[in-house]
Image (cartoon, grey):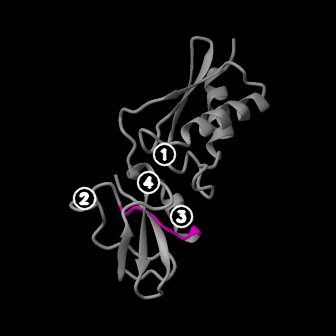
């Protein structure tokens, strides 16, 4: 009899540090995208949730999960994308928020941010921590980010949008 509990924990740990292709300083576990690993119907089922429904990185993440598990001689694997419950920025770990800030991306404050105009009321600059910032574009380098400018240090930066 195979100890599937121990194996699912190992598998989770093997893939938890797979970096997000769009923000390589944080992992799929940091983002909260990696939901669980289960053993069902003679397969290890890895459940992930995209940050956006049409996230272009999902195929790359799925391929990397399968490749990493094949490297560990786990061939009976299936990756399930689940959309319910919908991913929220509340799933991002506090460690990931620190990593984002150090990388130059202002992390999301929480999922219940002001959505009146699709921007936050006060977004802190990740470089100087000033809240004297303004939105340049609601769309940043990727769909999950907006482009801001800091009026204090004059640098532009991405903000990871709340949702």
Distance in Å between CA atoms under marks 4 and 2? 14 Å
**Count of labels in the image:** 4
Disc on res. 100 = 3
Q: Which residue is mark 2?
A: 115
Distance in Å between CA atoms under marks 4 and 1? 14 Å
On the image, the x and y values in percent for residue 58 come to: 55, 38
Q: Looking at the image, do the residues carrying marks 4 and 2 touch, with CB atoms under 8 Å apart? A: no
Q: Which residue is mark 4?
A: 144
* Residue drawn at (45%, 62%) of the image: 140
Within 10 Å of disc 3 (Cα), the crowding (few <14, some 14-19, many 20+) is many
Q: Is residue 66 above or below residue 44?
A: below
On the image, the x and y values in percent for residue 108 come to: 40, 61
Residue span colored magenta: 103-109
Distance in Å between CA atoms under marks 2 and 3? 22 Å
Q: Which residue is mark 1?
A: 32
Residue 130 as seen in the image, left or right of residue 72: left
Mark with earlier residue (1, 3): 1
| Circle 3 SS class | helix
Mark with earlier residue (4, 3): 3
> Quarter-wise, where is residue 4 in the image?
top right
Q: Is residue 128 above or below residue 13?
A: below
Which of the two discs, 4 and 3, sits closer to the camera?
A: 4
On the image, the x and y values in percent for residue 101 come to: 52, 69
């Amino acid at each position: 009899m195979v100890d599937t509990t121990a194996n699912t924990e190992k598998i989770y740990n093997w893939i938890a540090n797979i970096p997000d292709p769009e923000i390589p300083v944080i992992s799929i576990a940091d983002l909260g995208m990696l939901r669980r690993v289960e053993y069902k119907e003679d397969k290890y089922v890895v459940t992930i949730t995209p940050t956006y429904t049409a996230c272009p990185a999902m195929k790359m993440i799925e391929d990397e999960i399968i490749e990493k598990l094949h490297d560990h001689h786990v061939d009976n694997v299936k990756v399930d994308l689940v959309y319910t419950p919908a991913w929220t920025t509340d799933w991002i770990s506090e460690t990931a928020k620190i990593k984002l800030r150090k990388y130059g991306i202002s992390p999301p404050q929480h999922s219940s941010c002001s959505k009146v105009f699709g921007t936050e009321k006060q977004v802190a600059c990740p470089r100087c921590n000033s809240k004297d910032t303004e939105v340049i574009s609601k769309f940043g380098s990727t769909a999950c980010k907006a482009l801001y400018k800091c009026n204090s240090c004059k640098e532009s930066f991405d903000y990871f949008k709340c949702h």
